[in-house]
């Protein structure tokens, strides 16, 4: 693999000049290692990464979206080159990838269903095999800090989130459908308030006609291991969004999060601005969550005056497990609210341990509800198999 330096292609890195053409020329057609030294690199277009490319950026290399030009659908700071045929073997190490939100040209379109509107995502990877992103900072997005769909055999490691302005829809790592076989490690929100939405979003089913999700897929998400996730004051730590697609074989280990809304949200988009199903069309409930384990989780409400439980479970599950869960009541700003609510499911067994006692509840109808005020140390949801 040849090594090239973006400075040799004319990149200036002074934060004023437009370095898009130089960076894209350095990226070329792939099969090369691209070095980005420290500096501030203004980028006026979408950088596209081909197969067999490694980007190695200095930790003080700030690659940022040019704020002077209006943005349209398909614009990102960084994406893979071929969304149709796919790419493979892309590695990104180091650097600050900066959406440079300014509330003007770099801002969310007022009509979220406008088919020409920009998604607002900083980095977007679609149809990629063997993707590695590590040691990067994602900063100042319009909407999602990162977005992935149809990505297989990936590693996302040592990633930090920071923003000068925290906005709604700031998902951290957002996964659409057809994401498989991944490792996610050492994810941290640096800015107080980030992420402004879901820290980890596993959205097998979502509204794909709104701008944040346009051009990604619905589909299964499976075989992913997550370790070491930290945020003092995020909106929601983990979203598992499943209606008819599967989320399965996911393990999350060692997560410590203060949450303004949910530690785990399994509402199947019921309470989103754009729900993806009608309740009366699914009298048995919705969702296909299978073998999802979250262990060694410490969570707390980071804001007062909440009006719901810390964990929302309104999705059909066959093996959803909380193992060694704890609620940090010393940090909790809303201790009067319960910890877990389970409802809108049918023929479901819940096993849990509270104060050393093993308990069991069966929810037969969608109107049945289980609310746990105390934090269960262990908690399992299983669909009762029907003959």
Image (cartoon, rainbow, N blue to C red):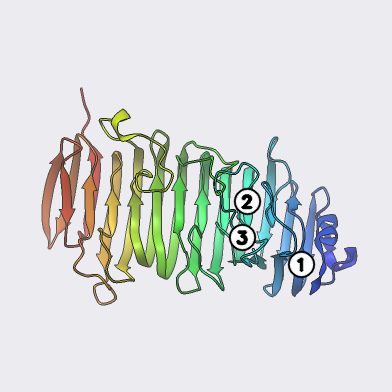
Which residue is found at the position 12% from the left and 61% from the top?
356
- Camera-side residue of 137 and 279: 279
Q: Which mark is residue 124?
A: 2
State the separation of the CA atoms marked 3 and 1: 17 Å
Q: Where is residue 49 in the image (x, y as percent from the top left)?
A: 74, 51
Where is residue 365, by image quadrant?
Answer: top left
- Distance from the alpha carbon under mark 2 to that under mark 3: 17 Å
Neighbourhood count class around disc 2 (C-alpha, 10 Å): few under 14, some 14–19, many 20 upward? many
Horizontal side, residue 258 vs residue 99: left or right: left
Q: Which mark is residue 68?
A: none
The residue carrying mark 1 is: 42
- Circle nearer the N terminus (2, 3): 3
Q: Quadrant of the N terminus?
A: bottom right
Q: Nearer the viewer, residue 76 or 114?
A: 114
Residue 107, label in figure? 3
Q: Where is residue 343 in the image (x, y as percent from the top left)?
A: 22, 44
Look at the numbered discs 1 and 2 and tell me whether their residues touch, using CB distance below 8 Å: no
Q: Earlier in the sequence, mark 1 or mark 2?
A: 1
Question: Is residue 94 among what the camera can see?
Answer: no
Q: In this view, does 206 lie above or below 35?
A: above
Q: Is residue 31 above or below residue 277?
A: below
Answer whether residue 77 is visible to the viewer in this image. yes
Q: Are marks 3 and 1 in contact (CB under 8 Å)?
A: no
């Amino acid at each position: 693999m040849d090594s090239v330096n973006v400075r040799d292609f004319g990149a200036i890195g002074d934060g004023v000049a437009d370095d898009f053409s130089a960076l894209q020329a350095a990226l070329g057609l792939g099969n090369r290692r691209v070095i980005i030294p420290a500096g501030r690199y203004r980028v006026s277009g979408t950088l596209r990464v081909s197969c067999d490319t490694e980007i190695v950026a200095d930790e003080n290399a700030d690659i940022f979206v040019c704020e002077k030009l209006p943005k349209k659908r398909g614009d990102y700071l960084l994406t893979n080159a071929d969304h149709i045929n796919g790419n493979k073997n892309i590695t990104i190490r180091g650097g600050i990838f900066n959406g440079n939100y300014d509330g003007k040209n770099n801002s969310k379109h007022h009509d979220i269903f406008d088919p020409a509107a920009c998604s607002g995502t900083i980095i977007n990877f679609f149809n990629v095999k063997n993707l590695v992103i590590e040691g990067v900072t994602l900063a100042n997005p319009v909407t999602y800090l990162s977005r992935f769909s149809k990505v297989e055999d990936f590693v996302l490691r040592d990633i930090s989130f920071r923003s000068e302005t925290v906005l709604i829809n700031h998902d951290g790592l957002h996964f659409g459908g057809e994401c498989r076989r991944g490792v996610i490690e050492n994810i941290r929100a640096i800015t107080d308030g980030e992420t402004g939405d879901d820290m980890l979003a596993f959205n097998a089913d979502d509204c794909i006609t709104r701008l944040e999700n346009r051009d990604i897929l619905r589909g299964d998400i499976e075989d992913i291991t997550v370790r070491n996730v930290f945020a003092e004051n995020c909106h929601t730590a983990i979203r598992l969004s499943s209606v008819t697609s599967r989320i399965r074989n996911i393990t999350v280990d060692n997560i410590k999060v203060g949450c303004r809304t949910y530690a785990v949200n399994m509402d199947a988009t019921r309470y989103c601005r754009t729900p993806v199903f009608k309740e009366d069309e699914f009298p048995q409930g919705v969702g296909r969550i299978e073998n999802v384990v979250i262990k060694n989780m410490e969570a707390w409400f980071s804001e007062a005056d909440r009006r719901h439980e810390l964990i929302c479970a309104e999705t059909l599950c066959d093996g959803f497990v909380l193992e060694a869960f704890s609620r940090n009541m010393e940090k909790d700003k809303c201790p009067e609210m319960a910890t877990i609510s389970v409802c809108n499911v049918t023929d479901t067994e819940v096993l849990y341990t509270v104060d050393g006692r093993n308990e069991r509840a069966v929810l037969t109808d969608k109107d049945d509800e289980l609310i746990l005020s105390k934090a269960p140390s262990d908690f399992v949801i299983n669909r009762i198999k029907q003959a």
